[in-house]
Amino acid sequence: MRGLLDTWRDTPAIVLSSALDLLARNRLANTLYADFAQADNLLRMTFLDPVARHFYRDWDRAAQSTVATLRQAAGIDPDGPRLSEVVGESSLRSGAFRMLWACHDVRTKTREAKLFHHSRVGDLELRYESFTVNSARLQQLVVYQAEPGTPSADALTLLGVSLVPARDAAPGAASDRGKTCGVAEQRHPLLDVAIPRGHRRAVPDGHGLPPDPAGR
């Protein structure tokens, strides 16, 4: 699965456990979630990291969807120790989670539009498709895409030039920091990120870029 994720360089892709742990993600997904202090579990990220209130443009909807997805998993594997662990932690630390968990709403993650705000590129509207991983019980592959020709597609391309090395649960994974798919790089003066030489995609003026404190 790790090799498959790495072949998708233009779309964020993740593998989720039934407890919403991020078991694996490609480099673009890792960059998409780079604003979070620890991108390890979607439930913890949504309810326990303050960044989530800015990252999810419609946090209420994202929170409801996350809890409903976890409720569906609890119906399949109610005695899962990891599921009990993340539910217990979130119940202790988040009143919003406790309220939503008590609603017993159930939902299977299949397809939907997600509204994000990334600190580097601004607003993104990405649609996702979810697929069952037949070789691994209770795991889901989730792939995000932007509608071609939209500002979100441009923002996703811009995000792609500031790739953060992908991570997964495998120990000793090699870091690709300072490399972009084995291609020589140059520094972009506005983003201060590495861009493969010969990348000619224009950066939209003012498109979601944070102000440069150095005035460059």
Image: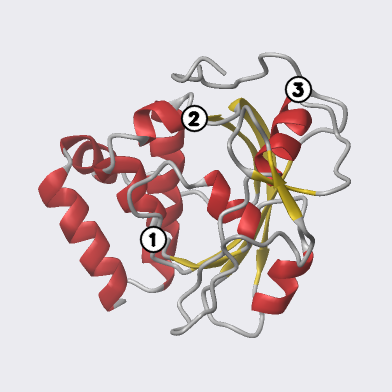
SS for tag 1? Answer: loop
Neighbour tally class for label 2: few under 14, some 14-19, many 20 plus, Cα within 10 Å: some
Q: Using the numbered discs, state the Cα–Cα distance from disc 2 to disc 1 in whole angstroms.
A: 19 Å
Return the residue at label 1.
40
Disc marking residue 32: none
Q: Nearer the viewer, mark 2 or mark 1?
A: 2
Viewer can see residue 91: yes
Mark sitting on residue 151: 3
Are dots 3 and 2 in contact, CB under 8 Å?
no
Please tell me whether mark 3 sits on a helix, a strand or a loop. helix
Q: Is residue 115 left or right of residue 194?
A: left
Query: x and y percent of residue 84 in the render?
Result: 23, 68
Q: Nearer the viewer, residue 55 or 137?
A: 55
User: How many numbered marks appear?
Assistant: 3
Residue corresponding to mark 2: 119
| Residue type pointed to by label 1 | Asp
Q: Are marks 2 and 1 in contact (CB under 8 Å)?
A: no
Q: Earlier in the sequence, mark 3 or mark 2?
A: 2
Q: Amino acid at mark 3?
A: Pro
Between marks 3 and 2 in the image, the one whose residue lies nearer the viewer: 2
Quadrant containing the N terminus is bottom right
- Residue 44 location in percent, x, y? 30, 51
CA–CA distance in space, label 3 to label 1: 28 Å
The spot of residue 172 in percent (x, y) is 46, 84
Q: Position of residue 103 (x, y in %)?
A: 29, 40
Callout 2: helix, strand or loop? loop
